[in-house]
Image: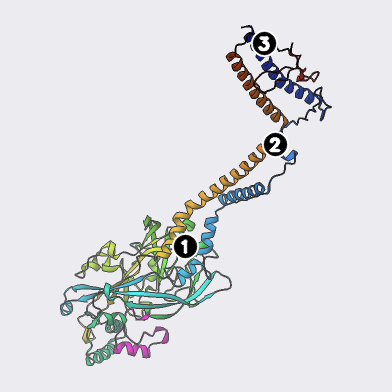
Amino acid sequence: MGLEKHYLRYGRTARDHILDWASCGRGRRHHQQQQQQGSQGSTATGRRSRPHVTHRGTPLSMLISHGVKISNNRLAVIIIGIVTLILGIVLSSIPWLDYFILKNLRLWNDTLSYHYWQRPGVIRLTKVYIYNVTNPDGFLNGEKPKLQEVGPFVYREDMEKVNVKFHENNYTVSYQHKKILQFVPELSIDKNTPIVTPNIPLLTLTSLSPKLGYLLSKTISVVLTAAKFKPFINVTADQLVFGYDDALVSLAHRFYPKHMRPMERMGLLLGRNGTLSEISTIKTGYQGMDQFGYIDSLNGMDHLPHWNEEPCTSVAGSEGSFFPPRDITKSNKIYIYDKDLCRIIPLNYVESVAKDGIAADLFRLPNNSYGDSEHNPENRCFDSSDYEAIRGLQNISPCQYGAPVYISNPHFYDAHPELLESVEGLQPDQKKHETYFKIQPKLGVPLEGKVRIQLNLKVTRAKDVYPVRDFRDFVFPVMWLEEGISELTPAIKRWIYLATVIAPYAAPIGSYLMIFGGASAIIFSFIRAYQNFVFARDPTLEILEMGRRSLRRGSSFIAHQQHKLLLHHRDSYSLLRHGPMATCMGEADSEDVQPIIGDGNLVSPEIS
């Protein structure tokens, strides 16, 4: 038991000496810091102490003050991080996406909008419905006309802008329309279907006869009777739409003044085929998007010559390809120009809708667009002394070679009730007969749109002209047509979806990810540089780590020897004599006690 007690006391003494050595090392370093000595002479053990560096301030300032060198790879990461961070902040602070969209939306060579505008590629259909008169003789005897809607006769409109010329100011571009209407039999009924319809050239002439006096009216009556002209004619639908030979039209083409001269043949849509002579100039958007796509002039004139005052003379309307974006203009009204109507027609904002997942604004034709000035003061300049203005009926005779042609909504939808009551067979329906557009508010591109117009012949009774003496004053519906688009092409739809649905969400998310990624790369690089510098340069951490390793080795050694002594009981043993440990400031070294691991026994330099 004496040996065991003595050895345990030795173990405790050895452990205390090791701990004292570690604490003395810390005390010696503290003493050196107080004296601010870089390098001391050799200690009593013959070893030199290492200088201690004190780190103060932030990690960044410490790295800068010590001139730490950063590896090329880490420097590249920091530079990329800074550039990414700055770029993300800039992109999140400015409306760059709107700028990019507007830049490509303005009309100019090789922009996306130019290619869409110059040759749309969308399927534009013109549907024609003709009213067949089933009781022509009964009408001449005083009956209401019985009308039968025949159709549709569908024509695909291949449209292209030709002779395109951008002006030097970049604000306007001039062009001509090239239209080819091709019959689509799979969507139509037989285009050779027979039709009974009013004789428009004859009734146009006889409606003017009361102004010519009695003698001239009788002369016209004799000529028309001899030529066997009748108030109703039998033609096919294709002839009525695209032309048939008529003696009166041929005479008018030969003798009328040039600016009023009609075509050589009679056809309601005859002037729509081929390259139109009219030169249109529209605004490109460079001067402002509030008039984007609107007509600036027609044949060099900034007004319509058919009327006498504003707003009837205005040409500031879209030809149908582009409209001013409502997100920019904040306007609830847009205008569209139709050559055959000789005027611009307004469309009012109704509500926000969606078309194929794309946001759109729904615009409709107001119910007071056509008709008298009492319901709409802007119509006062369309009024004339030739007729009494009626709600829902609009005079366009000045641009139809003087023919008494009037426009309305199909089936007299939204018109005065007396117009509908005067005929049989018409059934107004908003879905089928209204004019509307669905326009993307950011781009001003129509996603869907239909212009629906009915052509009516307003006949004035000519009692002195024998062939039409029984044709009373009447507004006779002749036909109605629908033109527009129902769907965009998949390619155009994808671009619009990308610009208006995906990009507004992807752009800010991308900007924020750039900010986060750039900041993270910079912070991570400096943290790694700081860690590497601290663990590579700080002697305090090195000495503490050495002390920990010595403490672990000493503890393992003592535990191992205690285990061996407890297993071997001996009767005789020699006491280990140890000398004094070295003092903390280097007065003696630890050479008095030198445990050696050899054959597993403790060996002392001095054995009593």
- Taking the magenta stretch, the answer to whether it contains residue 198 is no
Neighbour tally class for label 2: few under 14, some 14-19, many 20 plus, Cα within 10 Å: few
Task: Give left or right: position of 225 versus 293.
Answer: left
Residue at mark 1: 324
Q: CA distance from mark 3 to mark 2?
A: 49 Å
- Specify whether residue 441 is in view: no
Vertical comparison of 532 with 206: above or below: above
Label drawn at residue 536? 2
* Residue sitting farthest toward the front: 571
Occupied quadrant, residue 68: top right
Locate residue 462, reporting x and y percent.
25, 82
Q: Give the image location of residue 80, x and y in percent.
A: 62, 50
Based on the displayed image, in which of its 4 quarters is residue 57 positioned?
A: top right
In this rendered view, identify the residue nearer to me: 46 or 429: 46
**Disc 3 residue crowd, few under 14, some 14–19, many 20+, Cα 10 Å:** few
| Quadrant location of the N terminus in the rendered image | top right
- Asked whether the beta carbons under mark 3 and mark 1 sit within 8 Å of each other, the answer is no
| Local secondary structure at mark 1 | loop
**Residue 263 colored magenta?**
yes
Residues shaded magenta: 243-271
For mark 2, give the secondary structure: helix
* Label placed on residue 573: 3
The residue nearer to you, when weighing 292 against 260, is 292
